[in-house]
Image (cartoon, grey):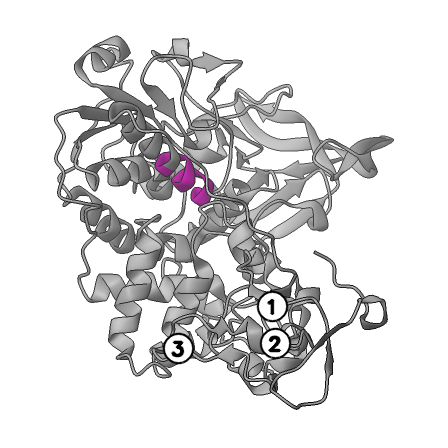
Amino acid sequence: MALLKKDKVKPVIRNTRSGASPIETSPFRPYLAPKLAPCMDSCPQGTEIRRVLMTVAQAEKYEKPQQEAFAEAWRIVTEKNPLPAVCGRVCPHPCEDACNRKDKDGALGINSVERFIGDWGLAHNLELSRAGNESYSERIAVIGSGPAGLSCAYQLARRGYGVTIFEAFPKPGGMLRYGIPAYRLPRAVLDAEIDRILRLGVEIRTGVSVGKDVPYEQVRREYDAVFVGIGAHQGARLGCLGEDAENVLSGVEFLRLANSGQPVRLGERVIVVGGGDTAIDAARVALRLGAKVTLLYRRTRMEMPAIQEEITGAEEEGVEFRFLAAPIEVLRQDGKAVGIRCQEMELGEPDESGRRRPVPIPGREFTVEADSIIAAISQKPDFWGLDSLFENGWIKTDSQGATSETNTFAGGDALSLGLVTIALYQGRRAAEAIHARLRHLEQTEDARLEVVKSDRVMLQWYQNALRAQAAKLSAQERLDHPWDEPVATLSEADAIAEARRCMSCGSCFDCGTCWSYCQDQAVIKPVTPGEPYRFKLEFCNGCKKCKENCPCGFIEMK
């Protein structure tokens, strides 16, 4: 409710004690109004980011051992996400783009804290916990062990179901293993987090492609529910003459070969076409394999959808960027590609994505020579043997991940191309729906809280604190040690310092400001640290000081 100005509020006259002079008061009274922090609102997983950060940040204040706080923060994260060390490395952190602290001294390093917590959990051998003691007879099949499938399997196994994962590739992980380079996601980290899920009792059958090696209908008959998370491992074609040359690879095909350790003969000059994460990964891997790399993109750098840190890394390492260039023909000689003829472009009006549409400039063409070409413009699912699930090349589901087929659910890139964290959410959402359907439970959605923006947070109340920066390898060091991680995990001290930058937007963090401003003793401090503050409304005169001075926007008046 909007607050009225004091001169428009009808005054209430009351006495606070016998014989005292009348005191003019407002009819409004304070109440605690929890709100949604913008970081949480922008996280597809709905991770309780604020709670995680404040658990780490307030350990010393509440006399909790810091190691205990780290373990508690890890348990909070893994309630929804069994892969925090993975996500801390590969997520493009939309939560940070929404962080209110960006309007003060820089967004919080949420992703780096998540990575620290994930690595801390691995280093201390923390095990994923079950959600209860129940054990059910129903068996669930999960097709695909990418982030969506792993998330679904985890959430079902911890609820007491028997889960079998069918994975077409030799090892689990899907695009995490076969699409993301090892320098960005060390395989030891990926393996450790996957193994932890399997230790909950999940069975995995690798090298088994449902629809090819095992009929899909057989899986449907033998299991009580099916989740399909096959990803999008088929590269899209350029759509131009000559692209069927043997040395033209799709981005996903090239990365799959390279990440599998198979030899890839690229030659000295490589052209990568595209502007997304797959294109940047392909360019940087080709560079690490010894090639000189040119990346062609039909828009400008500003419109590139790839993670900005990865684009910058590619630039620093020596990838050449040619913007406003669209391929129109693959030039061939003796059946092999030797270059690309390109059309120069300019930006026109925005398209449905909001980005400006590239428009050809008549008569402006150029040629780039190459020994190999990697087309990384898009990708799609390979739905051979699963045709009944697909419509126009993609699976359609309802809001709970259910397909049109009975007890069959889906998630991840088979629905549409998206982030790892979106796939994790879709796997969890489907697991919850499967559990509800098998147990005949009604699914309800949580009430939608108001998102608290920076104009409702007292930025000046918080002390300036620069963002903690993890150690990074220089461009030359990255090229000298091409498969080492370019960025380190935060130290324990830096992780704590970064967590303490959290402003706890929309939730009380026990700063005591409301209590210190109240002259009528209407604000009651909790006896037990961490419990909510209370109001004695019979003492309150409606001065609004508690609301006006609450730094995190937790208190409202009505």
Tag 1 secondary structure: strand
Q: Is residue 100 visible?
A: yes
Given contact means CB atoms under 8 Å apart, are the residues at marks 2 and 1 in contact?
Answer: yes
> Which residue is label 2 attached to?
540
Image location (x, y in percent) of residue 110: 48, 63
Tag 2 secondary structure: loop
Instruction: From the viewer's side, name the closer residue of 35 and 518.
Output: 518
Which residue lies at the image location 51% right of the left edge and 33% below the top edge? 417
Magenta-colored segment: predominant secondary structure:
helix
Q: Quadrant of residue 144?
A: top left
Label 2 CA crowd tier, 10 Å (few <14, some 14–19, many 20+): many
Picture quarter with the N terminus:
bottom right
Q: Please name the amino acid that badge 1 sits on.
A: Pro
| Inter-mark Cα distance, 1 to 3 | 26 Å
Image location (x, y in percent) of residue 107: 58, 67
Q: Please name the amino acid that badge 3 sits on.
A: Gln
Label 3 CA crowd tier, 10 Å (few <14, some 14–19, many 20+): some
Picture quarter with the C terminus:
bottom right
Given contact means CB atoms under 8 Å apart, are the residues at marks 1 and 3 in contact?
Answer: no
> Which residue is label 3 attached to?
58
Which residue lies at the image location 76% right of the left edge and 32% below the top edge? 351
| Inter-mark Cα distance, 2 to 3 | 30 Å
Which range is magenta? 420-428
| Inter-mark Cα distance, 2 to 1 | 9 Å
Q: Quadrant of residue 485?
A: bottom left
Q: Mark 2 or mark 3, which is nearer to you?
A: 2
- The numbered mark, 2 or 3, whose residue comes first in the sequence reads 3
Image location (x, y in percent) of residue 314: 55, 55
User: Is residue 228 found left or right of 322 in the rendered image?
Assistant: left
Which residue lies at the image location 31% right of the left edge and 53% below the top edge? 78
> Which residue is label 1 attached to?
30
